[in-house]
Image (cartoon, coloured by chain):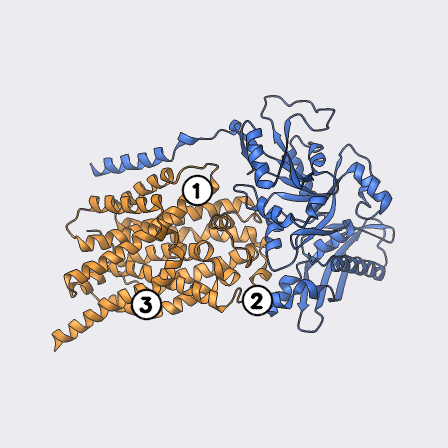
Chain colours: A orange, B blue
């Protein structure tokens, strides 16, 4: 059984969600342009109903919230929900893996096939699942304490190049694009809400709000900096590769700080991918509790790598799908919770 | 057992990412400088300079003036992409653009309506170093590239870096890269400007005719054929005009992109340092936009300080000349647009306002503060 404590999950969510939101607003869904910084903050507001539902889940005092809730569901329904959650994580991990491989190809002077780049990452996924979620959570906690420093240094070194005027007009391409971006961010937060649900109870108390609000604020600040480093080009429909290159090396900044940012980018992508595959593994083990961890690691690593290598059509529309993740996941969290409370009330009567 | 398995897996990771496809430096043709000219039949002529990797430095080739430590390739093709493809065949090594330092576009090509497409092609070329400097050359860009040689240093790459650091710091050239040219061409803000370059022979011919852009350059003799002074201003993706040396210094002062500049007034050569960042406020609410400029300069004279009022009026006149010159070109390279855009909620509202049109009739209000810099 793949389990991890809520305390570790909080660090995992903070680090991975930060990367997910940044990738989302710069590469996957850049339509909000210079107003993108508003999206994570508005996304958090949209996410509040789901956050309340998640807070209700933390009231359970033993096992994971999902274990408690799904215990009251019919077996088929429980497996269906767990399967959907596992697939959602695996799907997003595959798109992140693909992005990592593309970034490597852009920066390195090679044209390696995606297979060569995906296979080692697949092995990393397997190793991480074998090591367990607690190891991942602990490494996130250390990273969250260290990484703000290099980011701050990069910002300070580049401060003379930032142009505040590029953040105007304040609403960029319009309210509709900002709202779409916000729903995208809320969808990403809801996805990591599922990670929170599968985490077990810890001795130390952890704030549910903090682990979702901190990434939203952190990414808003990073997006403000990103918006000031290159002007918005609303009429230019940049290719995905060009958008990645714009993030990694916008050509206006000195190379040394960009190098640090590139390392953070790869580290962040790797971490995001590992957190998502870990969560996928946890939900898979909720369906088949007797399945050994080694097999889970193998299945998830193989599935995610295969999806990334073959790059099916549904992976290419990942950014658009993230927009509907929010209502989908919100419904998936709300429905079992409602069924659980109905059953509880019936038992009480 | 488990630890052993982990170790094996991690080693496999390392080996898979390892040196199987390592690429040696000797296997690459690193393009350092590129010249782009319009060729006959609507074709594009690309001239590139690639350093040779040899044990000992070679003497300079007398015939062409190019150091023989560098190989020159000249390709003619329909467009930029085709030229790169041909270059890839012409070069016996992998062509690598990640170390490119300078891209020179001939004035004829820069003024062509299709220049926007060319800029887009260059900027979107994979792994091309987008922080490379861009210059527009008065004459033939290929000839300009051929004349490049390490005049003071030992390598052309160092030469270009040092030259740009010196000229942009003093305000003689705009501090802009390929990324700046591309982004500002595509963005909704101010227009881009890049360095203006010419060969010494062209400078003499030009100064005899107009005496404008090369007013400094034409008055000296040197072995260095490649001259850089002033700015080529772009609008709508093509070059629409030039700013001479003084106008470029003024533009750089307005853009807060200068450390210290030399300025001649009343027979004195003055050293001017911005005492604080130039504050620009643009008010687009009236029928005609009003641009308020608040500039603080600290001035040091080598001998005698000229009259302060005379200096202020002279500076104001030069600043105004630079702005009026851009207005005449229907371009705005001073970063005023970013200041005006904040009055509009969205890009759509901003574009409807049509800044480039409104700027032409903008009213300028200048507040110039001059302080003496005493030791």
Depth order, front residue of A315/A8:
A315
Which mark is first along the chain, 3 or 1? 3
Callout in the foreground (1, 3): 1
Depth order, front residue of B364/A27:
A27
Q: Which residue is drawn at 24% across and 36% down?
A: B5
On screen, residue B307 versus residue B111, left or right, reads: right
Callout in the foreground (2, 3): 2
Q: Where is residue B253 in the image (x, y as percent from the top left)?
A: 71, 55
The residue tagged 1 is A104
On screen, residue B16 versus residue B315, left or right, reads: left
The residue tagged 3 is A51
The image quadrant of residue A115 is top left
Q: Which mark is residue B348?
A: 2
Q: How crowded is mark 1: few (under 14 residues within 10 Å), some or many (20 or more)?
A: some
In the picture shown, does residue B23 fall above or below A163?
Answer: above
Q: Do labels 1 and 2 share a chain?
A: no
Q: Residue at x 55, y 32 (%)?
A: B88
In the picture shown, does residue B113 fall above or below A213?
Answer: above
Residue A62 visible to an observer of this rendering:
no
């Amino acid at each position: 059984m793949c389990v991890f404590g809520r305390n570790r999950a909080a660090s995992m969510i903070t680090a991975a969600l930060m990367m997910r939101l940044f990738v989302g607003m710069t590469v996957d869904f850049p339509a909000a342009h210079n107003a993108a910084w508003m999206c994570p903050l508005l996304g958090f507001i949209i996410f509040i109903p789901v956050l309340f539902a998640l807070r209700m889940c933390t009231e359970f005092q033993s096992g994971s919230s999902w274990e408690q809730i799904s215990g009251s569901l019919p077996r088929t329904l429980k497996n269906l929900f767990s399967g959907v959650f596992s697939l959602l994580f695996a799907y997003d991990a595959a798109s992140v893996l693909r992005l990592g491989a593309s970034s490597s190809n852009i920066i390195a002077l090679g044209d390696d096939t995606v297979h060569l780049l995906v296979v080692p990452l697949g092995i990393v996924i397997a190793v991480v699942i074998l090591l367990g979620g607690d190891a991942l959570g602990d490494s996130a906690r250390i990273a969250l304490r260290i990484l703000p420093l290099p980011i701050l240094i990069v910002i300070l070194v580049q401060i003379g190049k930032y142009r505040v005027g590029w953040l105007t007009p304040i609403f960029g391409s319009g309210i509709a694009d900002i709202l779409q971006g916000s729903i995208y961010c809320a969808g990403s937060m809801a996805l990591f809400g599922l990670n929170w649900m599968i985490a077990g109870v810890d001795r130390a108390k952890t704030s549910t709000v903090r682990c979702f609000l901190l990434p939203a604020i952190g990414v808003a600040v990073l997006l403000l900096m990103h918006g000031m480093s290159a002007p918005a080009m609303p009429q230019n429909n940049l290719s995905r590769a060009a958008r990645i290159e714009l993030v990694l090396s916008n050509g206006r900044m000195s190379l040394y700080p960009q190098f640090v940012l590139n390392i953070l980018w790869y580290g962040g992508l790797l971490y995001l991918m590992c957190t998502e595959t870990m969560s996928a593994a946890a939900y898979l083990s909720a369906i088949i509790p007797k399945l050994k961890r080694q097999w889970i690691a193998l299945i998830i690593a193989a599935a995610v790598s295969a999806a990334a290598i073959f790059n099916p059509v549904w992976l290419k529309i990942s950014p658009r799908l993230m927009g509907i993740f929010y209502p989908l996941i919100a419904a998936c969290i709300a429905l079992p919770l409602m069924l659980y409370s109905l059953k509880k009330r019936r038992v009480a009567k | 057992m488990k630890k052993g398995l982990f170790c094996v897996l991690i080693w496999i990771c390392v080996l898979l990412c390892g040196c199987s496809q390592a690429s040696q430096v000797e296997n690459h043709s690193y393009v350092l400088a590129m010249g782009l000219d319009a060729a006959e039949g609507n074709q594009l002529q690309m001239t590139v300079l690639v350093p040779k990797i040899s044990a000992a430095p070679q003497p300079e080739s007398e015939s062409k003036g190019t150091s023989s430590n560098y190989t020159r390739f000249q390709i003619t093709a329909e467009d930029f992409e085709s030229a790169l493809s041909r270059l890839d065949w012409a070069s016996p090594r992998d062509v690598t653009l990640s170390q490119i330092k300078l891209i020179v576009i001939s004035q004829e090509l820069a003024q062509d309506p299709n220049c926007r497409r060319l800029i887009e092609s260059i900027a979107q070329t994979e792994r091309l170093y987008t922080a490379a400097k861009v210059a527009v050359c008065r004459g033939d860009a290929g000839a300009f590239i051929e004349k490049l040689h390490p005049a003071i240093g030992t390598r052309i790459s160092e030469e270009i870096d040092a030259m740009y650091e010196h000229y942009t710091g003093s305000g003689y050239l705009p501090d802009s890269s390929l990324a700046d040219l591309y982004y500002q061409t595509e963005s909704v803000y101010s227009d881009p400007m890049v360095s203006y370059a010419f060969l010494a022979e062209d400078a003499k011919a030009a100064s005899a005719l107009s005496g404008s852009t090369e007013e400094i350059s034409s008055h000296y003799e040197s072995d260095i054929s490649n001259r850089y002074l002033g700015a080529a201003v772009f609008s709508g993706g093509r070059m629409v005009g030039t700013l001479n040396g003084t106008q470029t210094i003024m533009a750089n002062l307005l853009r807060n992109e200068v450390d210290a500049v030399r300025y001649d007034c009343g027979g004195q050569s003055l050293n001017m340092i911005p005492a604080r960042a130039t504050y620009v406020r643009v008010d687009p609410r009236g029928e005609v936009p009003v641009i308020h400029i608040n500039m603080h300069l600290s001035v040091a004279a080598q001998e005698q300080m000229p009259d302060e009022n005379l200096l202020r009026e002279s500076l104001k006149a030069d600043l105004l000349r630079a702005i009026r010159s851009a207005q005449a070109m229907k371009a705005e390279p001073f970063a005023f647009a970013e200041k005006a855009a904040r009055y509009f909620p969205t890009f759509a509202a901003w574009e409807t306002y049509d800044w480039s049109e409104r700027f032409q009739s903008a009213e300028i209000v200048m507040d110039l503060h001059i302080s003496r810099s005493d030791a």
